[in-house]
Image (cartoon, helix red, strand yellow):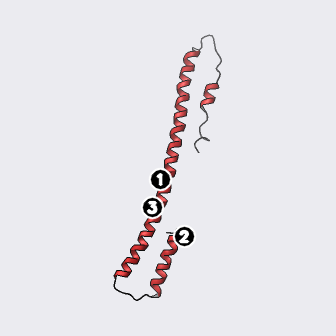
Amino acid sequence: MYQERILLTGKDILEKEFKIDTRGYRPQEVDKFLDVIIRDYEEFISIIKEIENDKKELIEDNIKLKQEIRTLRTKLDVLRDDSSGNNDVSNVDLLRRLSNLEKIIYGKD
């Protein structure tokens, strides 16, 4: 996902060749600094992958919890209806229960 937005990879940095001028930088210092940059890039990519995995797990947990809430609400409605002392079942009650079951089965809010 983020890879399309990052222009350089660790390999790109490692293989970059610079022209040396008469008054240029010391190649050893440049190489050491580029090594640090490469390690940072690799660490950033590792961190991003971990965060994306965590995000995916949280989304899955969220979906499961929403389904559980729907199930518990339906059970609570059924218990309220049963405890009301009214044992007569009307068409409206049946339609409401059927609607709740469809919500559970098809996952609609």
The residue indicated by pointer 1 is 58
Crowding near pointer 1: few (<14 within 10 Å), some, many (20+)? few
Q: Which residue is mark 3?
A: 65
Instruction: Tell me residue 87's x, y (percent).
Output: 38, 87
Residue density around tag 3, few if under 14, some if 14–19, many if 20 or more, within 10 Å: few
Which residue is at the front of the view, 54 or 30?
54
Q: Position of residue 74 (x, y in %)?
A: 43, 73
Task: Give the x, y percent position of residue 41.
Answer: 55, 33
Q: Is 59 in front, or is 7?
A: 59
Residue 106's disc is 2
Mark earlier in primary sequence (2, 1): 1
Spatial CA distance of label 2 from label 3 is: 15 Å
The CA span between labels 2 and 1 is: 21 Å
Q: How many labels sit on residues?
A: 3
- Amino acid of disc 3: Leu
Q: At label 2, which amino acid type do we have?
A: Tyr
